[in-house]
Amino acid sequence: MIQTWKMAWSAVCANKLRTFLTMLGIIIGVAALIILVSIADGAGDSVSGQISEMGSNYLSVRITDQKENPLKLTEFMELMDQEEFLASSPVGRTNVTAKSGYTSSSINLYGVSGGCLSILNLELYAGRWIKNTDLENHSYVIVISYDTAVEYFGRGDVVGERLSLDGKSFQVVGVLSEDSVSLSSAMTVKSSDDTSETVILEGFIPYSTLSRIAENVLAINQFYVSSAQEDSMELAERKLEEILQKRFGNDEDAFSIQNQSDVLEAMQEVDQTMSLMLGGIAAISLLVGGIGIMNIMLVSVTERTREIGIRKAIGAGKANIMLQFLLEALIVSMAGCVAGIGCSFAGLKIIGQFMGTGMTVSMNGNVALLSAVFCGIIGIVFGLYPANKAAGKKPIDALRYSG
């Protein structure tokens, strides 16, 4: 067995360029498989992580038909006062021009209530969140994101400062932490050193105040509700649907309820499907590499016909000949696999540098292991026919072969 292994290794190393070109198909296939699946996993984990950070224990409701009877804040608070609900918050959005000193730009402004903080898992860096008294008094107070605080005031702790929104002065009562997930889209602005930097510009004010200063926020069209029982979203969802059915005359088309836990599960299923699809596409190139191994092994068998005849003439059995050529195919396949894993590791490191902190890309160990197993199978399957052909040659015919 050891002698057969040495002979197979010598045969593989005898023509290094041809061996490398044969391995190239396997290298590309393995690298493509690992990189594509790892990127898909990284993208899925990033999106799922953002959804999880915003909380998965809440329901998102959008009202599409007010039935000529707009849902106002007072009625909303009464409807949501149920034991099945832990917290609720209306959500209104508009775009305003914010100004502080010489800094002036557009920001996304949200009208919410006190329950929004716990529903969306937001964290405060400084100050406080919006209170019920702020809603009742239509207070001109605002909670801003950390990036907004730095953009307008040059620091994070700006509680007590004043920020002008479309000419109206608001007092900053709170600043969100840097890690809090934004509800707004990131927008690119120029920093002081004239390099592009992505920051989040947004603020939260009492919903009652937003309805006064924004013409596009006249009635509650969207709101969030969290469940009192984390392990039973279905109970809260049924209760909410019952309330809305009654409020909108049993018209199911007047509103839609979205369960964030369902969204998270759907995203995970999409991620798995994408990984399988990309993995399947990349696996095809591995099969092509296997065909390349079979092709080169058939050429090798033809070239070494006299060698096979001599070995058989001095007593080598059919099993010995077959095992040698199988080992050669397996060595080429597994060497290509190892090189492909190395290339994918280096490639993912480079891709990770370009991705930055927005998405983490790392090698999927299970995919690397699966690649190794698959390459082993390819080496055996695609090396079996050439090995059998070599082992089946008759000594006398092999010795007469002149090439």
Image (tube, grey):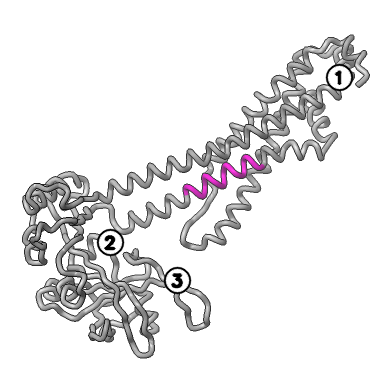
Residue at the outermost front position: 68
Q: Is residue 379 above or below residue 139?
A: above
Give, as a three-letter code, the residue at label 3. Answer: Thr
Magenta part of the protein: which range?
A: 28-41
Give the labeled residue for mark 2: 121
- Residue at 79% in and 27% down: 8
Give, as a three-letter code, the residue at label 2. Answer: Asn
Give, as a three-letter code, the residue at label 1. Answer: Thr
Please state the horizontal and vertical placement of residue 144, each as a whole percent of the image: 30, 75
Q: Viewer-nearest of labels 2 and 1? A: 1
Q: Secondary structure at mark 3?
A: strand
- Residue at 69% in and 33% down: 333
Give the labeled residue for mark 1: 305
Q: Is residue 271 above or below residue 221?
A: above
- Front one among 159 and 295: 295
Residue at the outermost bottom position: 101
Q: Secondary structure at mark 1?
A: helix
Please state the horizontal and vertical placement of residue 258, each as a whole percent of the image: 24, 50
Prevalent SS, magenta region = helix
Q: Viewer-nearest of labels 2 and 3? A: 3
Q: Determine contact: label 3, label 1, CB under 8 Å.
A: no
N-terminal label among 2 and 3: 2
Query: Which quarter of the figure has residue 201?
Result: bottom left
- Residue at 59% in and 55% down: 349
Q: Local crowd at mark 2 within 10 Å, few (<14), some, or many (≥20)?
A: some
Q: Local crowd at mark 1 within 10 Å, few (<14), some, or many (≥20)?
A: many
Please state the horizontal and vertical placement of residue 385, each as a whole percent of the image: 71, 19
Residue 392 belongs to magenta span: no
N-terminal label among 3 and 1: 3
Query: Which quarter of the figure has residue 298?
Result: top right
Q: Determine contact: label 2, label 3, CB under 8 Å.
A: no
